[in-house]
Image: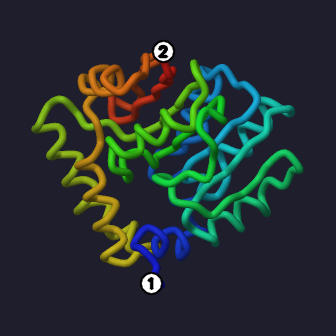
């Protein structure tokens, strides 16, 4: 079976991804991830979707030594990198599709996304999250936010597509970089977050902006 664009991107970028992400976020990605974890009430069974090189997993294990962590990704190379970075008997690395999670209904307490949520069909993934989460379980999301101001959004899009492209192309192919730029279009405005997740049975417990509003930290709670 031919690999998807997502698999190709992350299979090829696993060695340089951490360095690239640190450069692209001016070294702030670790601070944001730690802030998201601190805003989350960790419980027994935790899932990291799109685990990549395992940075969220590493930080979760540092915060809580007892929780059982599932790390899911489509990329075999990313999973291998993550496992080499953080190996623990209470961490299970799984190659799986986020839209068809290999978990029973109401079996997880916490779910994390770090710069992954916008790459997924919003309606489909939210329904899948409700399926696998226990009542009052949480979803914690670190994601690019789309500016409310259209002129500012166009500037950000230009920055990613033109000014940043030469650096991105050192790591990614044209097809892969185009995929990243196009994914910005799927980012949510902060005004869209509460109405969307409320409609799908989630209460927004924590919502803060970072980096001039271009980064959103969100913690959702599954309700009736």
For the point 79% across and 39% down, which residue is it?
Answer: 68
Q: Is residue 15 visible?
A: no
Residue at 28% over, 50% down:
184
Report how far apart the C-alphas of labels 1 and 2 lie in the structure: 40 Å
32 relative to 125 in the view: left or right:
right
- Within the image, what quadrant is residue 168 found in? bottom left
Residue ranking furthest to the right: 89
> Which corner quadrant of the image does residue 162 belong to?
bottom left
Question: Residue 44, how many percent across, how many down?
Answer: 76, 29
The answer to whether the residue labelled 1 contacts the one labelled 2, judged by CB atoms less than 8 Å apart, is no
Where residue 165 sits: x, y (%)?
31, 66
User: Which residue ends up furthest to the bottom in the rendered image?
Assistant: 1
Instruction: Identify the residue at horizontal 41%, vertical 44% (top origin).
Output: 125
Residue at the location (74% across, 45% down)?
58
Q: Nearer the viewer, residue 108 or 113?
A: 108
In the image, 40 versus 164, the foreground residue is 40
Residue 144 showing in the rendered view: yes
- What coloring was used for the rendering? rainbow
Q: Secondary structure at mark 1?
A: loop
Q: Residues within 10 Å of mark 2 (few under 14, many from 20)?
A: some
Depth check: 75 or 151 in front?
75
The x, y position of residue 3, in whole percent, is 46, 79
- Label placed on residue 169: none
Q: Tell me where residue 34 appears, x and y as whole percent.
A: 63, 31
Residue 2, label in figure: 1
Q: Is residue 58 above or below residue 98?
A: above
Query: Where is 170 relative to 39, above or below?
Result: below
* Residue at far front of view: 105
Element assignment for label 2: strand
Q: Which mark is residue 205?
A: 2
In this rendering, is residue 77 above or below 136? Answer: below
């Amino acid at each position: 079976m031919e690999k998807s664009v997502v698999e190709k991107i992350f299979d090829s970028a696993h060695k340089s991804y951490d360095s690239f992400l640190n450069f692209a976020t001016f070294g702030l990605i670790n601070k944001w991830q730690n802030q998201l974890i601190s805003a989350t009430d960790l419980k027994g069974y935790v899932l990291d979707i799109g685990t990549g090189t395992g940075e969220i997993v590493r930080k979760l294990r540092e915060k809580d030594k007892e929780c059982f962590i599932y790390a899911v990704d489509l990329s075999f190379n990313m999973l291998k990198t993550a496992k080499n970075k953080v190996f623990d008997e209470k961490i299970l690395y799984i190659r799986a599709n986020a839209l068809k999670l290999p978990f029973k209904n109401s079996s997880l307490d916490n779910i994390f996304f770090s710069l992954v949520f916008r790459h997924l069909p919003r309606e489909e993934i939210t329904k899948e999250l409700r399926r696998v989460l226990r009542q009052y379980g949480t979803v914690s999301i670190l994601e690019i936010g789309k500016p409310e101001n259209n002129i500012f959004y166009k500037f950000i899009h230009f920055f990613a597509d033109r000014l940043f492209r030469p650096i991105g192309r050192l790591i990614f192919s044209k097809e892969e970089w185009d995929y990243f730029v196009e994914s910005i279009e799927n980012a949510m405005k902060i005004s869209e977050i509460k109405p969307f997740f409320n409609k799908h049975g989630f209460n927004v417990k924590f919502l803060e902006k970072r980096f001039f509003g271009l980064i959103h930290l969100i913690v959702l709670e599954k309700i009736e």
